[in-house]
């Protein structure tokens, strides 16, 4: 009988960001440090991930994309800069850092006066590099302008009743009298991808204004103005020759204040953000040969179960065991076998302080969690299936 040898478990750490606290890269680094402190020599790989929202550019940069700095106009007209990730073929443009809530001053939301012009400026800048594919990471937007600002930056001209061109905001969509598409930038030969994790239509009780407008500071009266404005924008673009009415009812049209809809009009393909970024960042190749995957996000809740990144990671990693490390577990259960997650560790269960707003505390708790995980690991046999201590 031959002897059975053992090897050190091979671990892939593949988390999303902890919103408001740590980037995905910082989460992965902190967990890896804890694992290595407890078990020197342990084989750990890190792959910071994103689901198509904020953090998508950072995840692409962590996977080897190059940073491209672009001057833009912020959501309320202020000069700003953004970073686009580009690898020579694919460019990732993030709504959160071109027209996002995070770009507004604290407690100064702008539901009626904000625009997505910065998104279009970033796309236009990267088009000069001749990419084969441009990915719009939809999520975290400050505006509900139906993507009119983005379209303006890409060459669509909106005019008021006096014939004056202007860049619409959410509150001025209703004043558009005419649309001129003749100056639209040439997107021929460029694959446009819209990555998101919502399926809302543009209009109605489940639409962009009704569902997401209040999160951007819209009062009930503001929501009514935004809804009417989006309806007017649909009519004007339909009159200009685009299939605006048909696209408005499509799943995902209401993403990012209607940027999903505007992207569709430009020919974008709507995709699941989590699955798309796992493909883009090479998750399947990274998980091959691993004995354990550690994933996570800032908050585990019912939305997670509807296809957020930890659940997608678990599905894609199977049959490799997956555990999740989260900032807070609102589900109050420590295992999700139906979703392939064998153990859940929550930072909020380790402290009475609010780690979600304290990056240093979050990093320290993640290192401690990494040590706890390492103590539970059973070395994998080189001749049998890896043991699962979770």
Image (cartoon, rainbow, N blue to C red):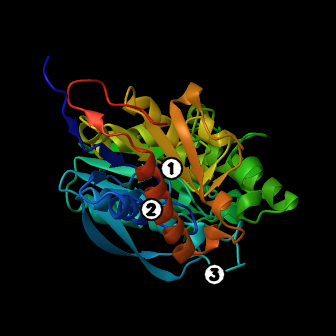
Q: Mark 1 sits on what residue?
A: 296
Horizontal side of 302 relative to 193 (left or right) equals: right
Q: Marks 3 and 1: which is nearer the front? A: 1
Secondary structure of the residue carrying tag 2 is helix
Task: Give the position of the N terminus as an image quadrant.
Answer: top left
Q: Quadrant of residue 316?
A: top left
Task: Assess disc 1: are there few (<14), some (14-19) or many (≥20) residues with their C-alpha within 10 Å of its C-alpha.
Answer: many
Q: State the image coordinates of residue 88 (x, y, percent, origin top left).
A: 17, 56
Choose between 305 and 90: the one closer to the eye.
305
Question: Would you say the residues marked 2 and 1 are in contact, meaning their CB atoms lie under 8 Å apart?
Answer: yes
Q: Quadrant of residue 269?
A: top left
Residue on which disc 3 sits: 105
Is 214 placed left or right of 376 in the picture?
right
Q: Secondary structure at mark 3?
A: loop
Residue placed most toward the observer, 126 or 185: 126
Crowd tier of the residue under label 3, counting other residues whose Cα lies within 10 Å: few below 14, some 14–19, many 20 or above: few
Across and down, in percent, residue 297 comes to 54, 52
Give the alpha-carbon distance from disc 3 to disc 1, as whole Å: 29 Å
Mark 3 or mark 1, earlier in chain? 3
Along the horizontal axis of the image, is 107 left or right of 286?
right
Residue wearing tag 2: 27
Q: Residue at x 57, y 59 (%)?
A: 140
Q: Which mark is residue 329?
A: none
Mark 2 vs mark 1, CA separation in Å = 9 Å
Of mark 2 and mark 1, the one earlier in the sequence is 2
Q: Write the residue at 71% across / 78% down.
A: 108
């Amino acid at each position: 009988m031959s002897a059975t040898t053992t090897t050190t478990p091979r671990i892939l750490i593949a988390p999303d960001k902890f919103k408001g606290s740590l980037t995905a890269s910082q989460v992965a680094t902190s967990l890896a440090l804890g694992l290595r402190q407890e078990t020197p020599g342990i084989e750990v790989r890190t792959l910071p991930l994103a689901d198509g929202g904020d953090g998508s550019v950072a995840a692409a940069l962590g996977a080897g994309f190059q940073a491209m700095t672009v001057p833009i106009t912020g959501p309320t007209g202020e000069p700003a800069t953004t970073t686009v990730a580009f690898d020579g073929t694919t460019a990732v443009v993030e709504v959160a850092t071109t027209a996002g809530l995070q770009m507004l001053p604290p407690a100064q939301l702008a539901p009626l006066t904000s625009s997505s012009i910065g998104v279009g400026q970033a796309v236009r800048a990267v088009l000069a590099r001749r990419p084969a594919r441009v990915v719009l990471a939809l999520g975290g937007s400050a505006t509900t302008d139906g993507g009119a600002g983005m379209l303006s930056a890409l060459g669509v001209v909106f005019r008021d009743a006096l014939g004056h061109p202007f860049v619409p905001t959410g509150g001025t969509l209703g004043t558009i009298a005419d649309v001129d598409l003749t100056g639209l930038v040439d997107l021929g030969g460029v694959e446009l991808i819209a990555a998101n994790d919502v399926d809302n239509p543009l209009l109605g009780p489940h639409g962009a204004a009704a569902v997401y407008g209040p999160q951007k500071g819209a009062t009930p009266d503001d929501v009514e103005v935004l809804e009417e404005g989006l309806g007017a924008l649909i009519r004007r673009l339909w009159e200009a020759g685009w299939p605006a009415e048909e696209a408005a009812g499509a799943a995902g049209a209401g993403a990012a204040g209607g940027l999903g809809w505007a992207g569709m009009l430009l020919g974008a393909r709507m995709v699941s953000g989590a699955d798309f970024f796992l493909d883009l960042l090479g998750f399947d190749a990274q998980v091959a040969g691993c004995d354990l995957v550690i994933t996570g996000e800032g908050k585990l809740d019912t939305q997670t179960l509807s296809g957020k990144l930890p659940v997608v990671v678990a599905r894609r990693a199977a049959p490799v065991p997956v555990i999740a490390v989260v900032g807070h577990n609102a589900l109050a259960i420590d295992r999700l076998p139906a979703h392939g997650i064998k153990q859940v560790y929550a930072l909020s269960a380790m402290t009475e302080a609010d780690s979600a707003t304290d990056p240093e505390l979050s990093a320290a708790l993640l290192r401690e969690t990494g040590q706890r995980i390492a103590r539970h690991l059973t070395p994998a046999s080189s001749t049998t299936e890896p043991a699962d201590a979770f």
